[in-house]
Image: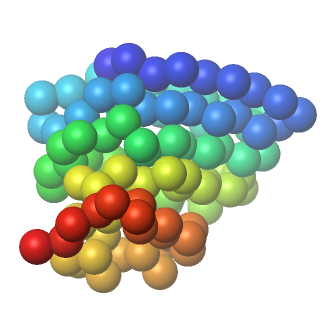
Amino acid sequence: MTAKAKKNDGVMCLSIMDDMTIYNAHSLKETLLGYCVPSTQELQLDLSAVAEIDSAGLQLLLSLKAEALKRGFTLRLLRHSEAVIEVFELLKLGTYFGDPIVFPANWKKS
């Protein structure tokens, strides 16, 4: 799994650089849980580079949300890719995660 991480005053910003599919869900889960440490107050996931997300990737995001509630830190999903927006819209999950979803101006929803 490829990710870029930046930390600033308890806020960890992580850019997911791979697809969120069954093929890399296990390594992605290990990587993400590695950032769920007591010093993390907020974990921000930049999803702009996620070209594909399947049920395993979605399950991982749901699991991470539960882990954030359990460990007492905030999870924020940022810059949703078109693939992520489509899945969230289909399953009506936008309000569950509570983060604003911005539709790109050039996005053509079919």
| Residue 65 or residue 7, whichever sits in front | 7
Q: Is residue 25 left or right of residue 77?
A: left
| Residue 30 or residue 4, whichever sits in front | 4
Task: Say which quarter of the image contains residue 24.
Answer: top left
Query: Where's the C terminus, which quadrant?
Result: bottom left
Residue 35 in percent (x, y) is at 60, 29
15 over 72 or under it: above or below: above
What is the number of callouts on the image? 0
| Residue 46 or residue 67, whichever sits in front | 46
Residue 25 in percent (x, y) is at 24, 34
What residue appears at the point 15 percent right and 50 percent down from the top-left corner? Answer: 54
Residue 67 in view in this figure? no
Residue 1 in view in this figure? yes
What residue appears at the point 75 percent right and 26 percent down from the top-left corner? Answer: 7
What residue appears at the point 42 percent right and 32 percent down from the top-left corner? Answer: 16
| Colour mode of the rendering | rainbow
Task: Say which quarter of the image contains residue 8.
Answer: top right
Q: Is residue 45 left or right of residue 7?
A: left
84 over 39 or under it: above or below: below
Task: Say which quarter of the image contains residue 70.
Answer: bottom right
Residue 31 in percent (x, y) is at 44, 24
Seen as rendered, the residue at the extreme front is 106
Residue 51 in percent (x, y) is at 23, 40
Query: Where's the N terminus, which quadrant?
Result: top left
